[in-house]
Image: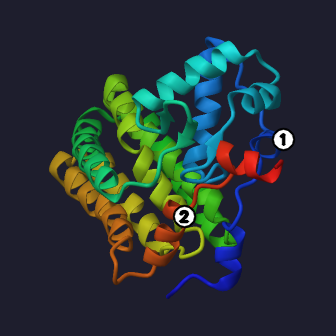
């Protein structure tokens, strides 16, 4: 399935940064630099800020109602994480989507998640089982309502619950870093949605294994589940459905400093 003309038109022009920031707000947690970092990362991972889009330090600061210092510091952190590129004498740009980096991130994510499931199955109690079943029910309601975004929010809560049960907070931080590129690819799929019922069935298998304290069964169920994300990455190959949209996004450089100068001359 090739992307429609309407879909390509949607990504034809990047929204100005200040428009993207309208309605968004800092989370109020920790340093101002950290808050700016998290908000920009979220906007990039959800494709509200597009690959290769120019990020003006001045516009970001104005849109967030902060000084340029925390924005500059956040840009440096984002560059260190490969989320933006700082080009000397040119400016800061959102990094292009990198399928190889996504696959490496998925490898790390899968390894840690499967170990987490194994650990959670050994340590789970009655309250844990209740929490997981509640999340299963929420996911089922999202599917019934056709709420894809709501389902993936519940999916994140489900995985976070497993990490809580396994008591592996540092592993969760490693996954958050590794999955950035994977999540950008997943967000491309809002136009080519996967079968959410399959994801839900995986969660049900995981819950059953955890409740039975079947550590190996939980690991196997998690590996099957993470394989679904590998299938999504496979759609970023030259003969697959997302390739045209992917290459279209990655070759764009909307809103660069050079283009702004051209518009004023």
| Mark 1: secondary structure | loop
**Left or right placement of residue 148 versus residue 120 in this view:** right
Answer with the quarter of the image where residue 205 lies. Answer: bottom left
Q: How is the image coloured?
A: rainbow
- Mark 1 or 2, which is nearer the eye? 2
Q: Residue at x 70, y 74 (%)?
A: 9
Q: Nearer the viewer, residue 160 or 106?
A: 106
CA–CA distance in space, label 1 to label 2: 23 Å
Q: Nearer the viewer, residue 92 or 30?
A: 92
Residue 22: numbered disc? 1
Q: Residues within 10 Å of mark 1 (few under 14, many from 20)?
A: few
Residue found at the far bottom of this picture: 1
Q: Nearer the viewer, residue 165 or 111?
A: 111
**Does residue 217 sit above or below 148 in this rendering?**
above
| Residue 264 in view of the camera | yes
| Percent x, y of residue 239 | 34, 84
Q: Residue at x 58, y 65 (%)?
A: 140
Q: Residue at x 83, y 48 (%)?
A: 264
| Percent x, y of residue 261 | 74, 45
For marks 1 and 2, the one nearer the N-term is: 1
The residue at which mark 2 appears reads as 249
Residue found at the far front of this picture: 265
| Percent x, y of residue 115 | 21, 41
| Residue 43 in view of the camera | no
Residue found at the far left of this picture: 216
Residue 149: numbered disc? none
**Does residue 221 sit above or below 17 in this rendering?**
below
Q: Nearer the viewer, residue 164 or 57?
A: 57
Q: Residue at x 61, y 20 (%)?
A: 72
């Amino acid at each position: 399935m090739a992307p429609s003309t309407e879909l390509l038109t949607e990504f034809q022009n990047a929204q100005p940064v200040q428009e993207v920031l309208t309605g968004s707000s800092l989370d109020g947690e920790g340093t101002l630099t950290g808050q700016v970092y998290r908000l920009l990362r979220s906007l990039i991972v959800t494709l509200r800020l597009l690959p290769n889009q120019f990020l003006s330090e001045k516009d970001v600061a104005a849109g967030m109602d902060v000084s340029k210092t925390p924005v500059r510091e956040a840009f440096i952190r984002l560059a260190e994480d490969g989320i933006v590129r700082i080009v000397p004498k040119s400016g800061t740009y959102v990094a292009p989507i990198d399928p190889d980096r996504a696959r490496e991130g998925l490898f790390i994510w899968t390894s840690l998640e499967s170990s987490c499931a194994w650990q959670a199955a050994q340590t789970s109690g009655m309250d844990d089982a209740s929490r997981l079943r509640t999340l299963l029910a929420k996911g089922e309601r999202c599917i019934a309502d056709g709420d894809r975004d709501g389902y993936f929010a519940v999916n994140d809560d489900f995985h976070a619950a497993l990490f809580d049960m396994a008591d592996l907070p540092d592993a969760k931080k490693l996954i958050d870093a590794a999955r950035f590129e994977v999540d950008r690819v997943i967000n491309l799929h809002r136009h080519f949605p996967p079968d959410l019922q399959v994801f839900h069935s995986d969660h049900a298998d995981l819950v059953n294994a955890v409740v039975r304290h079947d550590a190996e069964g939980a690991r196997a169920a998690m590996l099957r589940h993470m394989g679904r994300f590998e299938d999504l990455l496979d759609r970023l190959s030259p003969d697959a459905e997302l390739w045209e949209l992917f290459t279209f996004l990655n070759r764009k450089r909307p809103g660069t400093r050079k283009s702004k100068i051209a518009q004023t001359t």
